[in-house]
Image: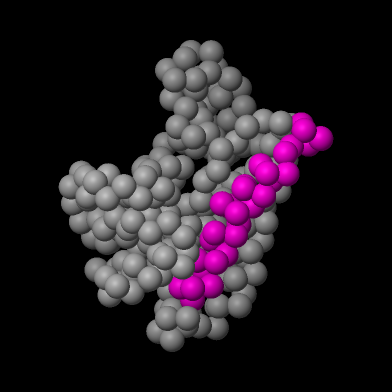
Amino acid sequence: MPNVLITNVKHYAGPGTLPVLLRDGIHPICHDSSFKNGNIARSFEKDYPGTTALGAQTPGSLLSELNERQVDIDAVVSNDVFPNTPCPIEEVAVETLRDSFEALLMFPFKLTQLLLPPMKQKKKGCFVFVTSARYLQPEFGFSVATSIRAGTTSFALALAKEVAPFGIQVNVLAPNYLYSEAYYPRSRFIDDPKGREKIAAIVPMGRLGEPEEAGELVAFLVSGRSTFMTGQILNFTGGWP
C-alpha cells in the first residue's frame, strides 16, 4: 500500500483528496496544524479509518516523526495554504509577505529537501504541488498569493528537471475557483444566489470546482499509472480565464 504524505489535509485540496486516496487503497499520512492537539489527531484517524495523523508541524519534525514511525513516503501532496486577504500592493505588510513566503514556498522547499534522499536511493517517488492558476490572469489585490504561488510552481518545475533521472515525478495542480472554506466559502459562493451568479459570470463551466474533482486528479498523479508525465502544470479552473 503506497504511503502518501498530504500537508494541510483539512484545507484547500485536502478534503477532496483524502477520500479518493482511501477509496483507491492508498495510505494517507496526514499533516495539519490542528494535529498539534493529539486528541484532534486521534479523532481524525477514527473519522477516516486507514489514515495516519502526524502531530509534527515543521519539515524537520515531520521527518523525525516519520522515522520514529518507520514510515517510508512514496509520494507527497504539497497542499500548502495561507489566508488570502485582498490588498493593494503599496499596502501589503512586510510581515504578510514574509509569512506567506514561509507557508507557501519555504515549507514545501524544506520538506522536499528532506524527503528527496530516500526517493533518490529507491529511484522512485512522486511530488504533487497544489499551487494556483492565478498566474494566468493576475487579479487586483492578490499580488502576494499570485507571486509566491508562482514561485512554488517554478520551484516544482525546476525540481522535476533535477530528479527525473532518478525516476521521480513532479507535477503541479494549479486550481482557481475550487471550493474551499479558506478561499471560496460555501456561504458566499454556493449558498448565496448572488455569489453563484458571480462565479457563473467568470467561470465558463458556471460553478466552483468540487474538492473531490481535484482529488481525482491528485490520485491519478500519485498513482504511478503514468510515470512518464513530469514537469507539467495542470490548470484546474473550469475553463477560466
The question of residue 92 being in magenta is answered with yes
| Residue 210 in view of the camera | yes
Q: Residue at x 41, y 48 (%)?
A: 33
Left or right of residue 211: residue 28: left
Residue 116 to residue 142: above or below: below
Residue 89 percent coordinates (x, y):
78, 36
Left or right of residue 173: residue 75: left
Left or right of residue 166: residue 85: right
Q: Residue at x 25, y 55 (%)?
A: 51
Q: Residue at x 42, y 65 (%)?
A: 61
Q: Between 137 and 91, which is closer to the camera in this rendering? A: 91
Prevailing SS of the magenta stretch: helix
Residue 118 percent coordinates (x, y):
42, 81
Looking at the rendering, which quadrant does residue 165 occupy? bottom right
Looking at the rendering, which quadrant does residue 1 occupy? bottom left
Q: Between 211 and 43, which is closer to the camera in this rendering? A: 43
The question of residue 206 being in magenta is answered with no
Looking at the rendering, which quadrant does residue 175 occupy? top right
Residue 157 to residue 205: above or below: below
| Residue 14 in view of the camera | no
Q: Residue at x 44, y 79 (%)?
A: 119
Left or right of residue 163: residue 14: left
User: What's drawn in magenta, residue-wise?
Assistant: 88-116
Q: Between 24 and 59, which is closer to the camera in this rendering? A: 59
Residue 113 percent coordinates (x, y):
53, 72
In this view, the residue farthest toward the right is: 90
